[in-house]
Amino acid sequence: MVILGNGGKPEVHAEAERLVTAIRGRDGLVLAGVDLASDTNLSRLKANIALVLGGDGTVLHTARRMEDRPTPVLGINVGRLGFLAELTPEAFLDRLSDLAERRYTIENLLTLDCTLTPRSGPTRTFRGLNDVVLRSAPPFHLMEIGLSIDGESVMTYRGDGLILATPVGSTAHSLSAGGPILPPNAAMFVVTPICAHTLTQRPLVDDATHKVYEMVPLGQGIATTLVIDGQVQVPITCGDRVTIRRGKSPFPMVRLPGYSFYRTLRDKLGWGATPPGDRGARP
């Protein structure tokens, strides 16, 4: 295995040293190396598992750097929320025997390929794990975005922007905008408007298997930003085309025994929690 992470955080270096000592002292585990840089090409890692130290943003950044040859990732949370980087360092150290004895599974998460075709300039392609967002940029005017699916015009959205999310991304920006939660193994995309300027526009869940989705900003002179996974930001203009397809290769996540998507929702996002002061059913 190899240790990756956000080397810009001092605590990541400290945790990496602790993990190195623990892994080297455990029979059945071999440490191939440690790389805490932010710009290394990770598409040819010589390891069966990549331990990613950081928060969810570090996992997303790592996924893009692995390109179409990803190594199975186990996220170790040295950040805040930790939805993708689920385990704390202490919890990981308690599960070393599961890794040493190969008691884990690999869950292949749906990814997306986003192609930007501007009216002028070169075409660019981005890989994403969470979502693609078209959103208003300063001075933040109301914007219009046309959505087409397989070449058919579906809807023109008016509001602050539009999100197209994978199942993993359904618990991120899309959820905050009122979108539904999708299970991580669903072969679906969810399209969620941001502050839609009409009551008739609601999130759309649709098949991601073979379809092609296209979003086009329509307002002349309206500043617009294309955002991939909340990290890559590209200014675009009226008439530029943003095309999204299911990614060529999935992103493999390591799942240790006892993992539950629904428990993660409860523990990390407070899903289904009883409101403060509610004492439950009364006889």
Image (spheres, rainbow, N blue to C red):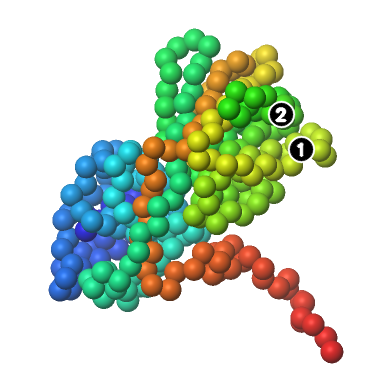
Q: Is 16 above or below relative to 142?
A: below
**Quadrant occupied by the C terminus:** bottom right
- Residue 148 in the image: x percent, y percent? 63, 26
Q: Quadrant of residue 39?
A: top left
Query: Does the image show residue 41?
Result: yes
Q: Which x, y percent locates residue 89?
A: 35, 68
From the image, tell me which residue sits under label 2.
155
Residue for point 38% across, 48% down: 251
Q: Residue furthest bottom?
A: 283
Say which residue appears at 45% left-offset and 12% top-offset.
121
**Callout 1 amino acid:** Gln
Q: Secondary structure at mark 2?
A: strand
Q: Which residue is label 1 attached to?
A: 201
Position of residue 127 measured from the top left corner of the image (x, y, whole percent)? 42, 36
Q: Are marks 2 and 1 in contact (CB under 8 Å)?
A: yes
Residue 226 in sight in this render: no
Q: Nearer the viewer, residue 115 or 144?
A: 115
Residue at the far front in the pictured view: 210
Earlier in the chain: of badge 2 and badge 1, it is 2
Tell me: 170 left or right of 254. Answer: right
Q: How many marks?
A: 2
* Rendering quarter of residue 12: bottom left
Question: Which image quadrant: the N terminus?
Answer: bottom left
Residue 188: x percent and y percent? Answer: 56, 45
Assign a secondary structure to mark 1. loop
**Residue ID at (56%, 18%):** 240
